[in-house]
Image (tube, rainbow, N blue to C red):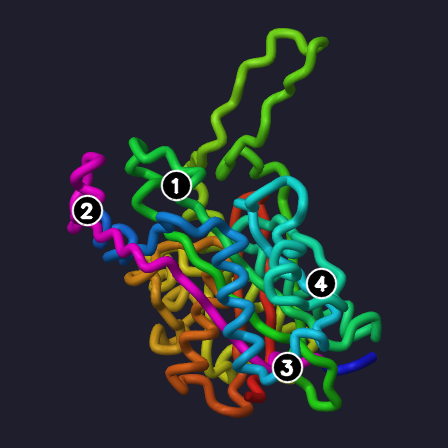
Amino acid sequence: MHEVQIIGTGSFVPEKVITNDDLSKIVETSDEWIFSRTGIKERRISTKEDTSHLAVKAAQKALKNSEISKEDIDLIIVATMTPDYFMPSTACLVQKEIGAVNATCFDVSGACTGFIYALNTGFQYIRTGQSKIALIIGADTYSKILDWSDRSTCVLFGDGAGAVVLKQSTKKGIISIYTGSDGTGDKLLTCPAVSLNNPFAENIEAKKSVVSMNGKEVYRFATTIVPRSIEKVLENTIYKKEDIDHYILHQANARMMDVIAKKMDISIDKFYKNIDKYGNTSAGSIPIAIDEMNHKSILKKDDLLILVGFGGGLTWGSVLLQWNI
């Protein structure tokens, strides 16, 4: 089995900044109401780019950062639940635009855990020798699946994409991965797809493709599953939670991170936060944070990181890795 390292990062968010005050003009809310409950001050909303466009720009930056030729990429995986099309896949659209002609391409759907699932898939491809260099992207344009009259959801999300390049290596990078799912929580966070529509269908009610969420139950789920995910990814390794330099959680709620840090007796200073600027960017959340930390030189060589995602499905997952850039 081969070792697998992250060798480059990139991210992209739309130019349009929507503040909490902006939202208060279209839905009954306020800056104080949103910020006190979520930690969000603003988010980026796309006015022209679809998901593939965000993904392409993040991918191009990651390739430049990694100094890898586009022809060397042999695998592209995009984590998204807001694709441009049901087919072709967003990954195929990325391949076309960046010219990665030698890559196998497909999407994965894991909601806000999607990037962790995609990273794990790319890791397994490279670890077993089926791939050598993989481009892993998390990208979502949630603005197109929001009910903008529902303040319980429309204030939470933003659009954005992040990407990492994985490469086969002789030195350890990704150390451990843990994932899980619970389909019995299917009603807690949903977005319906196309309704049944054929000449033989009987009494089918058309569904609107917008996000709905049981906020209290999702909050309870997240504050339970994140500590478990951290503990599980450390099992059967030589490391303890005290050894970890940075915890990079899916950016869903700042208060949630505070609760988790206190619950696990971990300094909140080890938890990176950028939710105030971007809101919840779903599959883009973790790779955007990684790229920011990389380019701000927050991440140092040999730092230990734990990434944790959680979202609709219900789904969750965590990754323990050593930083080598």
* Mark earlier in primary sequence (4, 3): 3
Q: Quadrant of the N terminus?
A: bottom right
Reading the image, the residue beneath label 1 is 215
Q: CA distance from mark 4 to mark 2?
A: 39 Å
Q: Nearer the viewer, mark 1 or mark 3?
A: 3
Q: Secondary structure at mark 3?
A: loop
Compared across the picture, whether 140 is left or right of 43 comes to right
Mark 4 residue type: Thr
Mark 2 residue type: Asp
Q: Secondary structure at mark 1?
A: helix
> Which region of the structure is painted magenta?
4-33
Q: Identify which residue, 85 or 98, lies in the foreground.
A: 98
- Does 25 lie within the magenta span? yes
* Mark earlier in primary sequence (4, 2): 2
Q: Nearer the viewer, mark 2 or mark 3?
A: 3
Reading the image, the residue beneath label 2 is 22
Q: CA distance from mark 1 to mark 3?
A: 42 Å
- Residue 322 horizontal/vertical position (percent): 59, 84
Q: Residues within 10 Å of mark 3 (few under 14, many from 20)?
A: some
Q: Residue at x 41, y 75 (%)?
A: 292
* Mark earlier in primary sequence (2, 3): 2
Q: Secondary structure at mark 4?
A: helix
**In this picture, is 77 found above or below 140?**
below
Q: Secondary structure at mark 2?
A: helix
Reading the image, the residue beneath label 3 is 68
Instruction: State the image quarter where residue 320 is shown.
Output: bottom right
Reading the image, the residue beneath label 4 is 121
